[in-house]
Image (spheres, grey):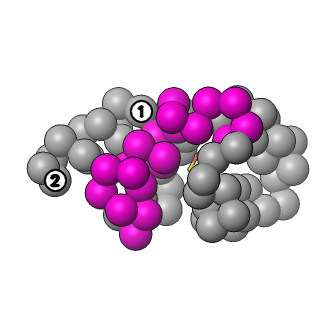
Amino acid sequence: MCKYYDICLFIHCKLQGKPELAEEVTKAFCLTDPLGCARYKVADSLGKESVSANLYPSETARAEAEIAAKR
Ligand code: SF4
């Protein structure tokens, strides 16, 4: 399980009212592959406050670009 799950705004806010998508993301990333999540990458590298509200877990290229730009 992702260590950011309890505080993840994407899961608990952005996907509120979208239970199917929330379940899909939880299965694909939070439970099984948090290291592959774009939001996890940014949170771990730059701090959880640096994660863009609209960053989707699958946007790893965007996450890596954001991390590179701030280093
Ligand atoms: S894997 Fe990604 S979407 Fe899931 S809780 Fe962690 S940071 Fe949030």
Tell whether 57 sits left or right of 49.
right
* Residue type, label 2: Lys
Q: Which residues are magenta?
A: 30-49
- The image quadrant that residue 43 belongs to is bottom left
Tell whether 63 sits left or right of 34.
left
Alpha-carbon neighbours of circle 2 within 10 Å: few (<14), some, or many (≥20)?
few
Q: Residue at x 59, y 57 (%)?
A: 4
Circle number at residue 60: 1
CB under 8 Å between discs 2 and 1: no
**Residue 44: percent from left, percent from top:** 39, 51
Q: Residue at x 25, y 46 (%)?
A: 67
| Residue 14 is at least partly visible in this image | no
Give the residue at mark 2: 70
| Residue in the foreground of this view, choosing between 53 and 8 | 8
**Residue 9: percent from left, percent from top:** 61, 65
Q: Secondary structure at mark 1?
A: helix
Q: Is residue 23 magenta?
A: no
- The image quadrant that residue 49 belongs to is bottom left
| Residue in the foreground of this view, choosing between 29 and 52 | 29
Tell whether 25 sits left or right of 48.
right
Q: Earlier in the sequence, mark 2 or mark 1?
A: 1
- The image quadrant that residue 20 belongs to is top right
Query: Is the shortest distance between ligand 1 and the CB of mark 2 under 8 Å?
Result: no
**Residue 3: percent from left, percent from top:** 60, 53
Magenta span dominant secondary structure: helix
C-alpha distance separating marks 2 and 1: 15 Å
| Residue in the foreground of this view, choosing between 17 and 8 | 8
* Residue type, label 1: Thr
